[in-house]
């Protein structure tokens, strides 16, 4: 998995992509994934963009690169959701490779790099993000590979990946600003206007472009900032100190967390100074972004920990290897003894993490399995609906989804603009989609719905009935034409 130090040609990139594709295929065959509501939204907005509609966000955050990626992936039609999950699983493999490489560049020998990759692949958070294709996973992969390229002194590549990350999620702006300050400091703190302007353009460009796009598309440069936090979005408690700790504890078991604390000391004292400053500085920026989001009244669910958790995996691997690295530096042990000490440290961290990791992974797999099945049955119910209903030209909020929060998938399945489907019945509603009693019970058992299932509307008829879903239409009023 570790690229050789001299493999800086396109062959390394091709090899990594081939490994990511193969790994994603294997992971998908072992555990099929299912898109989350948010990721379906990017496919919906991307398709809307291709059809000439501006992204219709409906109180969601604007993300330029994910919407553009959704536009391209939506060209695959019914295969787009599967392709999106495969891309996310490939990003997980690339993230594991990046963490492997970072540990090696810090000077820690095997099995520390392999332990870092193993912790990434088995992380309850990171593996779940890959299975449901949250954009936080490729965001973390971009940032960790930018770190690799900086440690390898390949600055153009590092800037490129950081700029892309800054157009995936707004937290990327913090990493761009920090990297711009780092490059300014390490290049002798230049004051020439041309050099300062170049650094400023790279560090601030994605943020400026993002805000200009929001201003042009939605009339306000801070649309996402105001529409996706309190009081416009109910607080979940995830941004409180206890909420932040709960998310971190779910993401990383105690053993790797303790090893990561030791890893901070090990990197500071044993790794090359320049590399240590870069890695520990990036870890600090990742932690600060979480604190800033919480302080600004945003919800901070576990998915926002993706970059921080990847860096914790690096620190934990360094911590596990600290005794062997210290002995090697002091030249007090034979090579064979050093390998044994390093293997013992990695085995201890990995072994202590097995039980909590397996428990959390099993819960994730059950949740994704039910979600995968429910999404498949919803697709079939919507396909039956389209045989009976012509939704072309449907008005805003003329389709209601009640009982669950899968609005984006209903939009995708019906092939309508994003603002056609809403999560409440309104006076001009012409189609209602809801889980059946059985489907609602199955979702409720895993905590996948917190919305009430409504009784059958008076004067409506059951258009489609499956084991998991029901679709209702008014008996008389049919502006959405019934064939």
Image (cartoon, rainbow, N blue to C red):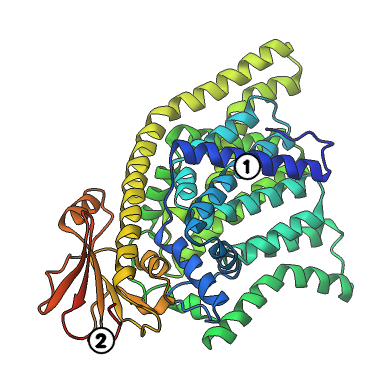
Instruction: Give 263 or 124, whichever is nearer the viewer.
Output: 124
Q: Is residue 339 in sight in this rendering?
A: yes
Mark carried by residue 428: 2
Above or below: residue 436 compared with residue 192: above
Residue 456, quarter of the rendered image: bottom left
Up the image or down, 35 lies above or below 426; here it is above
In this rendering, position of residue 419 left or right of residue 184:
left
The residue depicted at 79 percent of the width and 68 percent of the height is 199
Q: For the point 41% across and 53% down, which residue is it?
A: 244
Q: Crowdedness of circle 2 by 10 Å Cα count: few (<14), some, many (20+)?
A: few
First in sequence: mark 1 vs mark 2? 1
User: At which x and y percent is residue 128?
Assistant: 44, 46
Direction from residue 216 to residue 441 in the image, left or right: left
Q: Tag on residue 20?
A: 1
Tell me the residue at 55%/40% (across/down): 25
- Left or right of 280, for residue 201: right
Find the distance from the CA under tag 1 to the CA under tag 2.
47 Å
Q: Quadrant of the N terminus?
A: top right
Specify whether residue 261 is in view.
no
Q: Provide the secondary structure element on which disc 2 rests.
A: loop
- Labelled disc at residue 109: none
């Amino acid at each position: 998995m570790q690229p050789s130090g001299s493999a800086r040609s396109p062959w390394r990139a091709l090899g990594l992509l081939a490994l990511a594709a193969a790994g994603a295929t294997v992971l998908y065959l072992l555990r099929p994934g299912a898109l989350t509501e948010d990721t379906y939204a990017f496919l919906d907005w991307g398709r809307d963009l291709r059809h000439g509609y501006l992204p219709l966000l409906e109180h969601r955050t604007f993300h330029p690169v994910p919407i553009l990626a959704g536009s391209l992936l939506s060209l695959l039609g019914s295969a787009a959701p599967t392709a999106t999950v495969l891309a996310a699983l490939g990003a997980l493999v690339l993230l594991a490779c990046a963490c492997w490489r970072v540990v090696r560049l810090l000077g820690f020998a095997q099995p520390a790099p392999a332990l870092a990759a193993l912790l990434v692949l088995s992380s309850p958070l990171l593996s779940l993000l890959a299975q449901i294709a949250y954009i936080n996973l490729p965001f973390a992969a971009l940032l960790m590979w930018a770190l690799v390229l900086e440690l390898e002194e390949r600055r153009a590549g590092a800037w490129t990946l950081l700029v892309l990350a800054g157009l995936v999620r707004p937290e990327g702006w913090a990493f761009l600003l920090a990297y711009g300050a780092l490059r300014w400091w390490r290049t002798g703190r230049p004051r020439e206007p041309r050099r300062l302007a170049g650094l400023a353009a790279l560090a601030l460009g994605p943020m400026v472009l993002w805000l200009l796009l929001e201003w042009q598309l939605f009339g306000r440069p801070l649309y996402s900032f105001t529409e996706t936090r309190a009081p416009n979005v109910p607080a979940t408690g995830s941004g409180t100190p206890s909420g932040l700790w709960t998310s971190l504890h779910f993401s990383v078991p105690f053993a790797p967390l303790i090893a990561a604390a030791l890893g901070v000391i090990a990197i500071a004292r044993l790794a090359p100074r320049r590399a240590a400053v870069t890695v520990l500085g990036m870890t600090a920026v990742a932690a600060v972004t979480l604190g800033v989001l919480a302080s600004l009244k945003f919800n901070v669910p576990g998915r926002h920990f993706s970059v921080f958790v990847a860096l914790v995996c690096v620190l934990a691997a360094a911590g596990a290897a600290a005794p062997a690295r210290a002995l090697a530096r002091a030249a007090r042990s034979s090579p064979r003894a050093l390998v044994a000490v390093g293997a013992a440290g990695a085995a201890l961290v990995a072994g202590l993490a097995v039980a909590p990791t397996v428990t959390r992974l099993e819960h994730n797999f059950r949740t994704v399995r039910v979600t995968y099945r429910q999404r498949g049955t919803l697709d079939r119910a919507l396909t039956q609906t389209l045989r009976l209903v012509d939704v072309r030209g449907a008005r805003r909020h003329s389709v209601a989804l009640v009982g669950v929060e899968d609005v984006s998938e209903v939009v995708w399945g019906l092939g309508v603009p994003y603002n056609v489907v809403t999560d409440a019945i309104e006076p001009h509603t012409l189609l209602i989609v809801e889980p059946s009693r059985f489907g609602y019970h199955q979702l409720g058992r895993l905590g996948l719905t917190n919305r009430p299932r409504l009784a059958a509307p008076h004067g409506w008829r059951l258009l489609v009935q499956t084991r998991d879903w029901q679709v209702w239409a008014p008996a008389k009023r049919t502006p959405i034409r019934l064939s």
